[in-house]
Amino acid sequence: MKIFTPYRVCPLGAHVDHQLGVVTGFAIDKGVTLEFEPTEDGSIYVVSKNFPGEVAFHVSDEPEREMNWGDFIRGAVIMLSQKYTLTRGISGVIEGTLPIGGLSSSAAVILTYLNALCKVNDIHLTPQGIIDLAIRVERGYIGVNVGKLDQSCEVYCKEGCLLVLDTLDDSGRNIPVNKDMPPFEIMIMFSGVERSLAGSAYNARVDECKSAAYAIKALSGMEYGKYADTYLRDIPEGVYEAYKDKIPESFGKRAKHYFSEQQRVRKGVEAWKKGDIVTFGQMMFASGRSSIENYEAGSKQLTKLQNIIENVDGIYGGRFSGAGFNGCSMAIIDPAKREQIIELVTEKYLEAFPELTGKFSIHICKTANGVEL
């Protein structure tokens, strides 16, 4: 048996899904493939083509985290077992087709394992059910307070469409490419430096966003309950404008990114509908800049890439892919100028980071369908 789960990129709506904002995404034709067979005795045995070692345990076990790639199958088994009885395991080989960092590889791996385990145990989940379960694995076992963007894109996206998803109520729609839009490709630029969200500032940024919302609620007299249940989506934009200067500077920057990013999503989606890829791309560039200045993500490598791609002919728009703590950047490009774009970006990047020669890489992708459940 074989399961393929695509990676995703987020052109607009960065860093807002964990605050229940509106996001956009494409699934791409690169991702995670698991070739497997069921095991009747409930044993789990997985090896990876990307990482050393092997993972072996039983579906009835409750293994602790080992801080390696095997944690994703461990978490998938534990969280699925909390709701369903597992009698069969899997034996297989997993492989990812692109470098790690910013393409939601962790979500893709978890969705792949969950699908395989459901398949062999005759468990039938709805698309939203498997998304919710994958989020529980990341939050409850891996320890990363993710939003809904990654999993939703990797399930709901359609080839040739932009997914627009409201993470408040999980309502979404796929908007096809306008017949008047010029051709485009998705360019993935791996910085040469991998990242791990659990060890990055990702969780701190989530807390800062919540703190901004909590403070504004208190200052404005809005009702507020538990901190854990507080989101920037709760705050009307007019209330934010009235109280944005009264909260700590770092919290204010996170809130500024959230509200300005929602404006960029609205403007970008309207441009996409009209086939205006230039305006859509400009919103992407602005998103990347706000990620640096207001959300204060971005390693020195990704910041350099942002500075480069904003000034290369043939790149419509681009930004960090994912949280921005190392990993990848993405851009939408004109296919007719692909070769000179790749040459120029590579030359300028390696001038700044010659030590990453052989590690920096560029990959050209197309849109794709989400995982087949």
Image: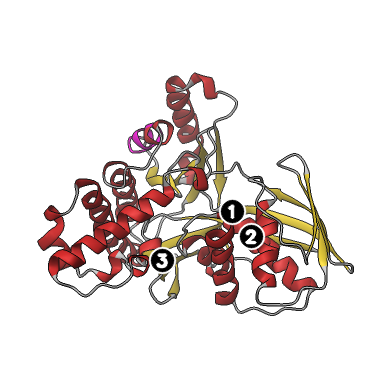
Rendering coords of residue 150 (x, y %): 51, 60
Residue at numbered disc 3 = 178
Q: Name the residue nearer the viewer: 115 or 31.
A: 115
Q: Amino acid at mark 3?
A: Asn
Residue name at image x 68 percent, y 61 percent: 112
Which element is circle 2 on? helix
Residue at numbered disc 1 = 106
Residue name at image x 31 percent, y 56 percent: 209
Residue at numbered disc 2 = 110
In three-dimensional space, the C-alpha distance between marks 3 and 1, rounded to whole angstroms, equals 32 Å
Rendering coords of residue 346 (x, y %): 49, 28
Closer to viewer: mark 3 or mark 1: 1
Q: Earlier in the sequence, mark 3 or mark 1?
A: 1
Closer to viewer: mark 2 or mark 3: 2
Q: Name the residue nearer the viewer: 57 or 70.
A: 57
The magenta segment: 304-311
Residue name at image x 54 percent, y 71 percent: 132
Residue name at image x 44 percent, y 29 percent: 344
Rendering coords of residue 272 (x, y %): 36, 63
The quarter in which the C terminus is drawn is bottom right
Q: What secondary structure predominates along the stretch shown in magenta?
A: helix
Q: Is residue 124 inside the magenta stretch? A: no
- Mark yes or no: residue 180 visible: no
The image quadrant of residue 212 is bottom left
In three-dimensional space, the C-alpha distance between marks 1 and 2, rounded to whole angstroms, equals 6 Å
Which element is circle 1 on? helix
Q: Amino acid at mark 2?
A: Ile
Q: Name the residue nearer the viewer: 98 or 179.
A: 98
